[in-house]
Image (cartoon, grey):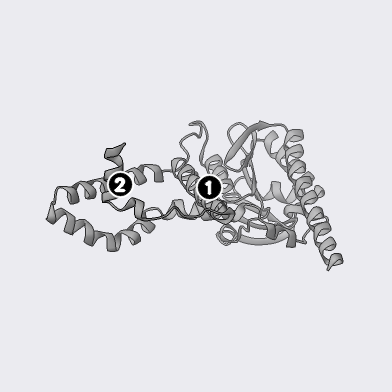
């Protein structure tokens, strides 16, 4: 103990008093710890983890070079730091974009100000859901491939601009006709928003996940990819088997019956409706108290 006391006294540790920690300080530390935990958790689930380990190796190498006084290597690494931040942004660009998209999809206190509700919950009414399910049932029976995006809260404007604008009421006849083989609009995805077919022949990003089954084609990989970058429900009809699938949040639910598909889409619609009605009640209560 005397050795440690003399060691600490030599470095001047005992010359400083212990700082006072209050509730705000504990809250500050807890928030920073939570943010660091979420960042590490997010990095470990993406390809950024391998890149991150590479950066740690370079930093460790720089530390060894400083300890061993390797002046040339130290000079090179110190000058590389000036452009290192820009390089990190470029290298991690896909992961940073995905992280910001995930952050934007989380619910905040600002959801209270969301007054959109009533019959067009999440961009789909129950009648529109029935039309989509009926169309999928018809296309499944004759093995007509289809890819349908149902916009929820995250706008799909970027994907919509890649296709041909339609702006028509959702009907099963229209959807079946769009995906009919050898027609001009059958290749690509259909985007539905606000109970209307907004666009057709839209191009979707393919998923980068390695967990996707090898027997799935481009249509399914595009559906999963679109559900990863947005909160859209993506309905997929296989051209090979006629099986109906639903991609949601990067997860693919395969071989659904029309009844199961309808139930899942209804469930999402009811959740949006209850959430919006709750927001309206909170908003009205706040206005009344004001």
Between 129 and 230, the one nearer to me in the picture: 230
| Residue labelled with disc 1 | 34
How busy is the neighbourhood of tag 2: few (under 14 within 10 Å), some, or many (20 plus)?
Answer: few
For image coordinates 45% across by 51% down, the residue present is 95
C-alpha span from label 2 to label 1: 32 Å
| Residue labelled with disc 2 | 8
Q: Are marks 2 and 1 in contact (CB under 8 Å)?
A: no
Residue 185 placement (x, y as % from top left): 61, 53
For image coordinates 59% across by 46% down, the residue present is 227
**Relative horizontal placement of residue 76, taking residue 162 as reference (left or right):** left
Q: Earlier in the sequence, mark 2 or mark 1?
A: 2
Q: Secondary structure at mark 1?
A: helix
How busy is the neighbourhood of tag 1: few (under 14 within 10 Å), some, or many (20 plus)?
Answer: few
**Relative horizontal placement of residue 153, taking residue 2 as reference (left or right):** right
For image coordinates 77% across by 34% down, the residue present is 259
Q: Quadrant of the C terminus?
A: bottom right
Give the image quarter of residue 161: bottom right
In the current view of this chain or complex, which residue is farthest to the right? 288
Q: Nearer the viewer, mark 2 or mark 1?
A: 2
Residue 28 placement (x, y as % from top left): 54, 54
Q: Quadrant of the N terminus?
A: top left
Q: Secondary structure at mark 2?
A: helix
Residue 270 placement (x, y as % from top left): 79, 46
Residue 8 placement (x, y as % from top left): 30, 47
């Amino acid at each position: 103990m005397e050795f440690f006391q003399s060691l600490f006294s030599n470095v001047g540790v005992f010359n400083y008093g212990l700082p006072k920690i209050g509730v705000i300080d504990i809250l500050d530390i807890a928030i920073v710890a939570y943010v660091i935990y979420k960042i590490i958790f997010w990095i470990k689930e993406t390809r950024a983890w391998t890149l991150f380990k590479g950066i740690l190796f370079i930093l460790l190498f720089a530390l060894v070079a400083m300890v061993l006084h390797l002046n040339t290597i130290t000079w090179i690494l110190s000058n590389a730091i000036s452009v290192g931040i820009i390089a990190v942004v470029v290298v991690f660009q896909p992961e940073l974009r995905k992280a910001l998209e995930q952050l934007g999809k989380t619910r905040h206190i600002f959801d209270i100000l969301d007054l959109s509700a009533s019959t067009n919950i999440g961009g789909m009414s129950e009648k529109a859901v029935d039309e989509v399910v009926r169309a999928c049932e018809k296309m499944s029976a004759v093995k007509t491939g289809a890819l349908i995006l149902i916009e929820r809260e995250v706008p799909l404007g970027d994907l919509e601009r890649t296709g041909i604008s339609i702006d028509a009421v959702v009907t099963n006849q229209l959807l079946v006709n769009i995906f009919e083989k050898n027609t001009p609009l059958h290749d690509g995805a259909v985007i539905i928003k606000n109970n209307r077919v907004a666009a057709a022949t839209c191009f979707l990003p393919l998923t980068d996940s390695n967990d996707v089954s090898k027997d799935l084609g481009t249509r399914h990989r595009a559906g999963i990819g679109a559900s990863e970058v947005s909160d859209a429900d993506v309905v997929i009809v296989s051209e090979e088997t006629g099986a109906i699938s639903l991609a949601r949040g990067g997860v693919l639910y395969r071989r659904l019956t029309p009844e199961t598909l309808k139930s899942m889409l209804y469930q999402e619609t009811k959740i949006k409706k209850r959430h919006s009605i709750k927001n309206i009640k909170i908003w009205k209560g706040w206005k009344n108290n004001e």
